Image: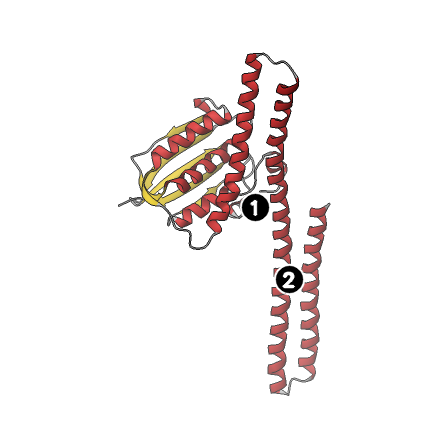
Amino acid sequence: MVVAGRRRSIAFFIALGAGLIAVSILLYVGWVLLNWRTGILLFFGVLLLAVIIGGVVLNTIFLVREIRRNEQHDAFINAVTHELKTPVASIRLYLETLQTRAVDEAKRQEFYSVMLADIDRLLGTIEQVLRTGRMGAAGRRLNVTRVDLGAIVEECLARARTLHNIPPSGLRYEPGPPLEILGDADEVRAAVSNLIDNAVKYSGDGVQVSVETAIVDGRYATLRVADRGPGIPKPELKRIFKRFYRVPGSVAGRVKGTGLGLYIVRSVAKRHGGRAWAESEGPGRGSTFVLQLPMAP
C-alpha cells in the first residue's frame, strides 16, 4: 500500500510539472503573438519563461528523487530488520529447547551448528552495514599492500561452499595466470565474497556458478562471476549497483539481502582505481558480474 501511494505521488508530481509547463508555454506564446513588436519585453518574457520551466523541471526531479530515495530507505530498513530478527528468533528457539527439554548429544550438536550459522548470518549483515558506513566516511584511507587476487578468490569460494553447502560441481573456478594487485586485502575480499554470494543466492536450488580470473590489456586483473539465475533486465544493469537498490519483481523479493552487496563491490572497485559492471541477456538468461582492478607493477 505504501509503495502504491508513493508511485501515485510520483505520477502526480510529473503530471503537475508537465501541466504547469504546458500552461506557461500557452500563456507566453499568446502573449508574444499579441506583443511581438516590443522587442525588450519579448526578450525578458522568453527569459522568464525559461526560468519558470527550468524551476518546475528541477522541482519535479527533486521531488521524484526524494520519494524514490525514501522508498529505498524503507525497503532497506525492512530487509535489515528481517535479516537481524530471523536469526535472533531462531537462536532463541534453540536455546529455549535446550533449556527446557532433555536433548541427546547428536541433536545438541546439530542445534549448536544451526545457532553458529545463524550467528554468522547476523555478523555478515552487521558487517555489510558497517562497511557501507566506512566507505561513505570522508578521508578514510586504504591499507594498501600487494594482494594475491587468486588466493582471495579461492578463499572466498571455499567459504561459500561451506556456508551454502554447495558441491564442487556447483561452484566452478577457472584460475588464470597469477594476479597480483595493489590494494586493501580486506576490501578486495569483501568485494569478491559479495559477488560470489550474490550469484549463489540468485541461482536458486540448482546452483551453477562459474568463476574465472584473467589479465586484460596487460594492465588489469579481471574477475568474472557468472550464474544461470533469473537474469537482469537491461534498464536495471546500472541501477543494481546503487545503495539499497534491489531489482523489483518476485525473484528479488524471495532472495534475502540488504541491497548493499553490489554497492560495496562498485565502491571497492572505484577506491582501487578499477570498475565493476554487470552483463545479462535479459530475464531468464543468467547474469555475469565483472570486477576489474589494476595490476601491481
Q: Residue at x 32, y 33 (%)?
A: 176
At which x and y percent is residue 201?
A: 53, 32
Marks 1 and 2, the one that precedes in the sequence: 2
Q: Position of residue 219 (x, y in %)?
A: 30, 45
Q: Is residue 279 above or below residue 63?
A: above
- The residue lying toward the viewer, choosing from 285 and 211, is 211
Q: In which quarter of the view is residue 50 placed?
A: bottom right
Residue 71 falls left or right of residue 205: right
Q: Which mark is residue 60?
A: 2
Give coordinates of residue 45: x percent, y percent: 63, 80
Q: Residues within 10 Å of mark 1 (few under 14, many from 20)?
A: many
Question: Taking 31 as reference, is 5 above or below it?
Answer: above
The residue where tag 1 is placed is: 244
Image point 54% across, 47% down: which residue? 243
Specify the quadrant that holds the C terminus.
top left
Q: Which residue type carries mark 2?
A: Thr
Give the crowd class for mark 2: few <14, some 14-19, many >=20 residues within 10 Å.
many
Q: Secondary structure at mark 1?
A: loop
Label 1 to label 2: alpha-carbon separation: 22 Å
Q: Say what amino acid the circle numbered 1 marks.
A: Phe
Q: Which one is nearer the viewer's eye here, 210 or 108?
A: 108
| Most distant residue in the front direction | 99
Q: Nearer the viewer, mark 1 or mark 2?
A: 1
Find residue 79 and report its horizontal and vertical position in percent.
61, 40
